[in-house]
Amino acid sequence: MKADIYSAFLTNKVKVFATQKDVKPFILPRKIMKKAAPFLIASAMTLTACSPKQSSAEKSAVSDVNYTEIYQQVIEQYNLMSLKEKEPFSQQEINEMIIHNNPPELVDFNFNHCPENVENFWEIVKNGIKATKQIQHSSLLSYKQKKEYEIVAYKMLSQMSRIKGTKDAIDLSDYNNLKTFLYFEKLLRYGDDYEKVLEKDDGLINEQFELFGRYYKDYEALEKKAQNFAGVRKFAYELYNNNDRFMISYQDSAQANKLSKRVLENWMKQQDITDKNLWYLTTVEDDGFANAVAYWHRRGSTLELSLGIDNRGNIDEGDFSPVGAILIHELQHVMQKKPASAEKPSDNKRTDDEVLFISSNFDDSYISELGPTLYSLAVEDRIYKHIKGIKEDKILDYGTLKFGKTKLKLGEVAVWFGKMIDKYPENSVDKLVAKDEVLQQLNQWGLGRASALSLSQSVER
């Protein structure tokens, strides 16, 4: 039945508008429109974009877009059916937003990446839908580019969720909703400037990446919980600033890099990461941002992250870390960062000059380094032992951490955290570190209260 309705619009047997004067327009019943919507949505945004300048070859390259498939892929990739107190919008509801879009007046022209309230969220999103339709008339874009605007907009709408039992109450702390807001705000700022809205340089991570901000709430929870453990911050500082943790030598770098890439591949499968082009390859000599996540989040500029990796595993000051281990570490940082600006909702009414020097909402403290660094230590310890044919549970003498008069072997920490990874198979490393057993042990070590094994018990490297 649905297929027959759709096919009828492709013949001359159905007319939905008058061809003579003084003839009342024919209005399709809403019931029929709802049934036909899944078949009409593929062209819902482009009904007014029939530009004769686009070649038939160009159109055919993207004419088979399946929006139902796009919706289902987003729902699956973002695990939206696993939500507890929230739920995704149905595809029919998204289609209704597009076809019957009636946006409120656009009054928020700040480019600040921070929704003030639910009304502000919908103001930006609904006006963004309107702008997506208007962009279909642009003479600056090819047919393929216009279609990409539609597809990305549909993905952004599909990833939204609302509080269960409501029509459109949005959780403004949800990382997916924040990124939907980010995208449509950027679209309203730059319009048909394709490069600024939809650029795809390797290693440039923005609101279109599912990974961005996935576990930022876990990091915030860890940061808050760690405030009750004075020794944890001390431990994090000592660990991150001890270069003995880079235990693999350049002589073993080729084999270590090869092994680490397998570890990275397995980790990404475990994390269910489907985003592509997450990093670019570079060298520490040529790139000051190598082996780090650069994070831009100021008003007036596009919010994005950049991730470049030294393709040999070189670290500043002559140390080495396997490429795969570096990437896991930095991607864990990407998941920690909230996809929103440094501002607060209350800053929306302030001028650009007033918010120019607002401090970051992301605390780049040593607590943010704690989980990723412990994970790197455990991974590299296991890679080293695999290369040397040493059992995983052997504690090696890589160097020591000093807490007052107490010395703690890095090898002991590596083995212990490897066991914690196995015991608590959390995808979020910050959620793992926040476990009571883990946090209490780190606190004891940081306070210098735990006895460390003597160096004579370690295995020489």
Image (spheres, rainbow, N blue to C red):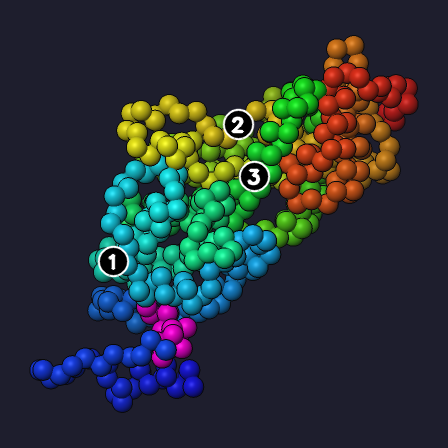
Q: Identify which residue, 362 or 31, lies in the foreground.
A: 31
The amino acid marked with disc number 3 is Lys
The amino acid marked with disc number 2 is Asp
Give the main secondary structure, helix, strand or loop, of the magenta stretch: helix
Q: Identify which residue, 455 or 422, lies in the foreground.
A: 422
Extreme residue toward the right, this view:
457
Circle 3 residue? 217
Tell me where the magenta segment starts and ends, as one range.
32-44
Above or below: residue 280 compared with residue 75: above
Circle 1 residue? 134
Residue 412 placement, left or right of 296: right
Q: Earlier in the sequence, mark 1 or mark 2?
A: 1
The amino acid marked with disc number 1 is Gln
SS for dot 1: helix
Q: CA distance from mark 3 to mark 1?
A: 36 Å
Residue 73, given in percent of the width and then of the height, sits at 52, 62
**Label 2 crowding class (10 Å Cα cut-off): few <14, some 14-19, many 20+?**
few
**Label 3 crowding class (10 Å Cα cut-off): few <14, some 14-19, many 20+?**
some
Q: In this rendering, does residue 379 appear at all? A: yes
Snapshot quadrant of residue 214: top right
Circle 2 residue? 363
Q: Identify the residue shown where x is 28% and y is 29%.
A: 351
Q: Identify the residue shown where x is 74% and y is 17%.
A: 447
Residue 40 belongs to magenta span: yes
Q: How many marks?
A: 3
Q: CA distance from mark 1 to mark 2?
A: 39 Å
